[in-house]
């Protein structure tokens, strides 16, 4: 897993675990954006868009360096966001003590398994 992508996931999970009330507002904002007229801007929405663009750039750079297989950077960024949001939501719903390091390791391993470059077939 490219270190920048793993660090991004870890930072998001740690941030939301430490700020659960903010996470609830974040999820509400995403829900509101789904049904809102196009072009409606909020501070939270602007933050989400900025973070998505950062992740897109990280993914595009990792693809260019051959660290991950060729993928659509925008779709991949959104998938990583959805997975991190789901991980935090699962923790909040379970209302159990969390092991953020274990959860981040699980998620980054899952992402890496899906993004790692294909093995090159040996040439004869």
Image: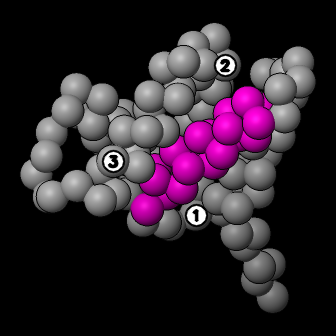
If you read the primary sequence from the N terminus, does the residue marked by circle 3 or circle 2 appear first?
2
Find out whether residue 92 is within the magenta segment: yes
Which residue is at a point 68% across and 38% down the rendered structure image?
89
Q: Residue at x 76, y 57 (%)?
A: 113
Outermost residue, top side = 18
Task: Give the image quarter of residue 6.
Answer: top right
Task: Give residue 1's quadrant in the image.
Answer: top right
Q: Which residue is mark 3?
A: 32
Task: Please tell me whether the stretch drawn in magenta is mainly helix, strand or loop.
Answer: helix
Left-right relation of 31 to 47: right
**Residue range of the region highlighted in magenta in the rendering:** 75-93
| Position of 25 relative to 114 (above/below) | above
Of labels 3 and 1, earlier in sequence is 3
Dots 1 and 2: beta carbons under 8 Å?
no
Residue where numbered disc 2 is placed? 17
Q: Are marks 3 and 1 in contact (CB under 8 Å)?
A: no
Placement of 33 over or under 43, stated as above or below? below
Q: Given this view, does label 1 or label 2 mark the residue nearer the observer?
A: 2
Q: Residue 13 in the image: x percent, y percent?
A: 64, 26
User: Does residue 94 appear anywhere in the picture?
Assistant: yes
Q: CA distance from mark 1 to mark 2?
A: 30 Å
Percent across and percent down for residue 67 are 59, 50
Quadrant in the picture for the C terminus: bottom right
- Residue 33 position, x and y percent, is 30, 50
Q: Residue at x 58, y 63 (%)?
A: 69
Front: mark 3 or 2: 3
Residue at mark 1: 69
Is residue 23 magenta-colored? no
Q: Residue furthest bottom?
A: 124
């Amino acid at each position: 897993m490219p270190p920048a992508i793993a660090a991004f996931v870890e930072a998001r999970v740690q941030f939301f675990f430490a700020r659960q009330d903010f996470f609830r507002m974040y999820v509400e904002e995403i829900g509101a954006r789904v049904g809102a007229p196009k072009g409606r801007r909020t501070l939270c929405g602007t933050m989400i868009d900025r973070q998505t663009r950062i992740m897109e750039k990280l993914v595009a750079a990792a693809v260019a360096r051959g660290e991950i297989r060729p993928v659509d950077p925008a779709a991949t960024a959104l998938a990583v966001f959805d997975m991190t949001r789901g991980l935090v939501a699962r923790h909040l719903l379970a209302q159990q003590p969390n092991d953020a390091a274990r959860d981040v390791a699980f998620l980054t391993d899952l992402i890496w398994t899906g993004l790692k470059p294909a093995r090159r077939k040996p040439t004869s």
